[in-house]
Image (cartoon, rainbow, N blue to C red):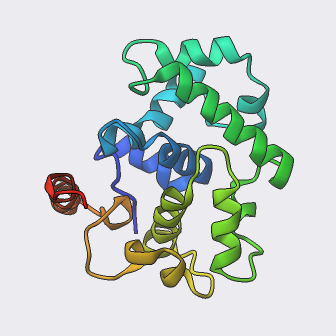
C-alpha cells in the first residue's frame, strides 16, 4: 500500500520508501495540520539536496539546521524547536540503532518492546508511539505480536482516529472529523 499521508505525491513517495522520513514526520505531527507535518521531510530533503540521513542530521550544526527549518515556508509552526527535536531524535537513532530506523522494530520480541523503544525516543510520548505502532501495523506490514493491543484504540480496524487510518483524501477528512468531535466534547 502506498502511503497517502501528506496528500502530495512526491512527499508521500519519500515517506513510502524512507522510514526515517516517516519517523520524523510523525515527530512533527503536532500543532500543525497532519498533511503539513508529513510533507515536511520531503521539503527538508529539497533544502538539503539529498535524502535524510540520521547520522548527518545528528551531526548537523544546530543553528544551520534550525535555519533550514525556519526558511520560508517554515517546515513547522515552531521550526527552530522542532529542528532541535529532530536532531535529538536522530542522535538517539545513531546511538541506539546505528542510524537505522528499522532497527526500532526489526528484532523486537513483541509489540510491547517496540512501544518501549518508541517511547524512549526524544519527542515520542506514549500516545504518539501508539499511533506510530498502529501506522506501522496498518500500512507498513510491521506487525509484531500484540501490535493492535499495544496501539490501543488506534490499532482497531474500521476506525478513523489518527494518521494510521489515512489512506486517501476521504479518510483524511474522516480523521479530521473525529478529532474535531473530540475537541468539541466537554472535558470531565
Is residue 109 visible to us here?
A: yes
Q: Is residue 177 left or right of residue 6?
A: left
> In the image, is residue 58 above or below residue 6?
above
Can residue 49 be seen at all in this image of the molecule? no
Front-lying residue, 73 or 27: 27
Classify residue 120 as left or right of residue 166. right
Q: Where on the picture, by quarter, is residue 73?
A: top left
Instruction: Count the numbered circles shown.
Output: 0
Report x, y in % for residue 165.
32, 67
Q: Quadrant of the N terminus?
A: bottom left
Image location (x, y in percent) of residue 181: 15, 58
User: In this image, 92 relative to 49: left or right?
Assistant: right
**Residue at the image point whose x is 61% and y is 33% from the top:** 85
- Compared with 16, 87 (above or below) is above
Percent coordinates x, y for residue 138 in the rendering: 43, 74
Q: Nearer the viewer, residue 113 or 34?
A: 113
In the rendered image, which quarter is residue 33 located in?
Answer: top left
Residue at 68% in and 41% down = 89
Give the camera-side residue of 168 and 164.
Answer: 164
Position above or below: 99 against 74: below
The residue sitting at 55% across, 24% down in the picture is 81
Name the spot of residue 63 as percent of width and height, x first.
Answer: 66, 12
Q: Looking at this view, name the residue that lies furthest to the bottom.
A: 145
Task: Pick the residue in front: 146 or 23.
Answer: 146
The quarter of the picture where the C terminus appears is bottom left
Amino acid at each position: 500500500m502506498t502511503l497517502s499521508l501528506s496528500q502530495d505525491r512526491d512527499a508521500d513517495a519519500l515517506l513510502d520508501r524512507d522510514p526515517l522520513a516517516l519517523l520524523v514526520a510523525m515527530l512533527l505531527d503536532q500543532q500543525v495540520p497532519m498533511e503539513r507535518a508529513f510533507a515536511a521531510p520531503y521539503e527538508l530533503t529539497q533544502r538539503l539536496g539529498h535524502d535524510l540521513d540520521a547520522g548527518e542530521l545528528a551531526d548537523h550544526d544546530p543553528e544551520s539546521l534550525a535555519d533550514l527549518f525556519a526558511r520560508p515556508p517554515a517546515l513547522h509552526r515552531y521550526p527552530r524547536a522542532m529542528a532541535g527535536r529532530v536532531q535529538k531524535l536522530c542522535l538517539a537513532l545513531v546511538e541506539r540503532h546505528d542510524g537505522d530506523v528499522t532497527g526500532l522494530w526489526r528484532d523486537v520480541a513483541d509489540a510491547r518492546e517496540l512501544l518501549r523503544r518508541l517511547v524512549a525516543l526524544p519527542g515520542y510520548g506514549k500516545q504518539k508511539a501508539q499511533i506510530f505502532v498502529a501506522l506501522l501495523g496498518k500500512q507498513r506490514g510491521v506487525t509484531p505480536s500484540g501490535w493492535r493491543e499495544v496501539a490501543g484504540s488506534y490499532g482497531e480496524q474500521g476506525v478513523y482516529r489518527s494518521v494510521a487510518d489515512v489512506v486517501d483524501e476521504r479518510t483524511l477528512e474522516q480523521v479530521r472529523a473525529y478529532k474535531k468531535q473530540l475537541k468539541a466534547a466537554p472535558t470531565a
